[in-house]
Image (cartoon, helix red, strand yellow):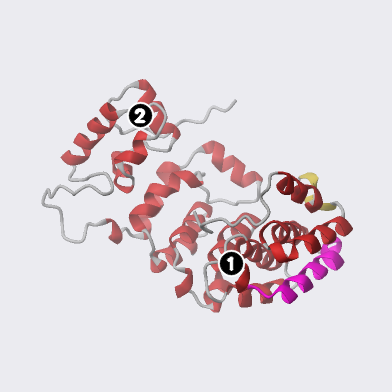
Amino acid sequence: MTNEAAPKSELPKLSKPAERGLHNAGFYRVEQFTGVTEEEILKLHGVGPKAVRMLKEVLGEKGLSFAGDKKVDTGGKAGEGVENLDAGTVMRELEALGKERMKKMYISNGAKEPVFGVATGAMKPLAKKIKVNQELAEQLYATGNYDAMYFAGIIADPKAMTEADFDRWIDGAYFYMLSDNVVSVTLAEADIAQEVADKWIASGEELRMSAGWSCYCWLLGNRKDEEFSTEKLEGMLETVKETIHDAPERAKSAMNNFVYTVAVSYVALHEKAVEIAGEMGPVEMKRDGKKPSILNAFEEIQKQVDRGRIGFKRKYVRC
């Protein structure tokens, strides 16, 4: 058990179930509800029409509203719309959402201070308010704050980013949760994704390699098979088989995931990927301060075969 203190609630007096449901979802301030609809709030456990009605009244008093509702004009300054949130405001919003438990988890996985400890799900209302803002994304990523860097990936405009931009982002990604879950995910929505990922894979640098292989995992799990060269992917499978056991540690994980993803999401090479996974066998990945992980693509593929999920494609790459 921990003694972490929950953020101070600024919500109106609600029933205990409603209050608990909102807090569990990361809602502590009235302004947070401007990024979600009434319907979304009603889906939370313990939150009913009465609670939503009370929240709506408080929002109205502040000249605010749920997403999709007509905003109340209370004479605010021109340009106060959500599109104009600056980096400082976003940083304060993120800090208010931070939790000590999440912060400890991020740090245990390699994050360095500054870290707020914001759950990714708690970022969604803020992201909905901003939608896409590349300039803001660049400012947040440059802070070096893990939560801000992660959030930057959510609001970035991948198609507006150049190869130099992505290189700058991967240079700033100091551990795998940034390289594989932020930079590679953002790259996967860019038209230059394969071109950049190929260079990173060939770089020999641990996190660049990891991001490059991870990018292909995101691509294969989302895009149509017709967008890939079967011959190229087959060659990449052979490269994994021949080099994975001597690869940098984080690259081992991404390479193992690549074989798994090809088997599950690229039907034309399913049998080949299963064969490669079997030949690879278990792969040991050493981790700083932790017991080694044993990666086994063959076993994970068989689980998806048993579930009838071969050919699976996700609808979106980024959340």
Q: How many marks?
A: 2
Drawn side of residue 150 relative to residue 254, left or right = left
Q: Residue furthest left?
A: 75
Mark pair 1, 2: CA separation: 40 Å
Give, as a three-letter code, the residue at label 1: Lys
Instruction: Check if mark 1's residue and mark 2's residue have beta carbons within 8 Å.
Output: no
Which residue is at the front of the view, 84 or 319? 319
Q: What SS does tag 1 mark? A: loop
Q: Which mark is residue 206?
A: none
Residue 70 is at least partly visible in this image: yes
- Tell me the residue at 65%/66% (across/down): 216
The image position of residue 191, as x and y in percent, is: 53, 75
- First in sequence: mark 1 vs mark 2: 2
The image position of residue 214, as x and y in percent, is: 66, 62
The image position of residue 293, as x and y in percent, is: 79, 47
Quarter holding the N terminus is top right
- Tell me the residue at 28%/56% (across/down): 82
Image quarter of residue 166: bottom right
Q: What SS does tag 2 mark? A: loop
Give the residue at mark 1: 224
In the image, is residue 313 part of the stretch drawn in magenta?
no
Q: Which mark is residue 47?
A: 2
Drawn side of residue 10 relative to residue 159, left or right = left
- Tell me the residue at 16%/60% (across/down): 78
Residue 116 is at least partly visible in this image: no
Which residue is at the front of the view, 227 or 245? 227
Q: Where are the magenta residues, as a range?
A: 228-246
Give, as a three-letter code, the residue at label 2: Val
Q: Residue furthest top?
A: 16
Q: Is residue 289 above or below residue 262?
A: above
Mark 2 crowd level (few <14, some 14–19, many ≥20, 10 Å Cα): many
The image position of residue 96, as x and y in percent, is: 40, 42
